[in-house]
Image: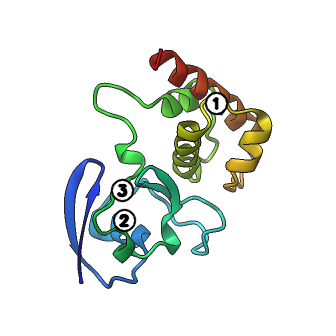
Amino acid sequence: MTTTFTLNGKQVSVDADGNSPLLWVIRDTLDLKGTKFGCGKAACGACTIHVDGKAVRSCSYAVKFAAGKEVTTIEGLSTEENMHPVQQAWMEEIVPQCGYCQPGFMMATAAMLKEIPNPTDEDIDNNIVNVCRCATYYRMRKAIHRAAELQNATTK
């Protein structure tokens, strides 16, 4: 089955079983390795991407559902000219320890900040439910607040 969608601003067509998880199409067929496999059950969030601007766990999202949609991975979050505020904040706050889960956290955060531009700690707790085995949650919380500041400064 051929599925056509926009990936990081470019139209792509892939020939894959329509029920294949979008994660494996992104990683194996399209060779973008930033989106990670964690649990395969949509529980950990390492595979989080955006589909039409919403955070989606790509390990349990069939590629057929991406047809005609805008898909963004961590590789497409920033532009060549500008780093995304979330990525900038992650660097400033030195968030990653091992770093494996961080692309998923950044994608979940970027989607949340579109909906909640000034999140409280409670907003973060209720919306960023990914799992980090290194327990960098404290630094991530600081980075999320910093990303909100950076994002709000650029929209003024």
Which image quarter is the N terminus in? bottom left
Q: Give the side of residue 42 with respect to residue 54, left or right.
A: right
Secondary element type, mark 1: helix
Separation of marks 2 and 3 at Cα, in angstroms: 13 Å
The amino acid beneath tag 1 is: Ala
Are the residues flagged by discs 3 and 1 in contact, CB closer than 8 Å? no
- Which residue is located at x 37 percent, y 65 percent? 27
Mark closer to the chain start, 2 or 3: 2
Visible in this render: residue 136? no
Instruction: Between residue 61 and residue 80, name the one nearer to us.
Output: 61
Are the residues flagged by discs 2 and 3 in contact, CB closer than 8 Å? no
**Residue on which the image places disc 3:** 71
Instruction: Between residue 32 and residue 134, name the one nearer to us.
Output: 32
Mark closer to the chain start, 3 or 1: 3
Secondary element type, mark 2: helix
**Residue on which the image places disc 2:** 27
The amino acid beneath tag 3 is: Val
- Above-or-below relation of 137 to 67: above
The amino acid beneath tag 2 is: Arg
> Residue 133 in the image: x percent, y percent?
71, 55
Separation of marks 3 and 1 at Cα, in angstroms: 24 Å
> Residue 126 in the image: x percent, y percent?
75, 49
> Residue 37 in the image: x percent, y percent?
52, 66
Mark closer to the chain start, 2 or 1: 2
- Above-or-below relation of 113 to 21: above
> How many numbered marks, from 0 up?
3
- Which residue is located at x 28 percent, y 64 percent? 68
Q: Quadrant of residue 129?
A: bottom right
- Which residue is located at x 23 percent, y 72 percent? 14
**Residue on which the image places disc 1:** 143
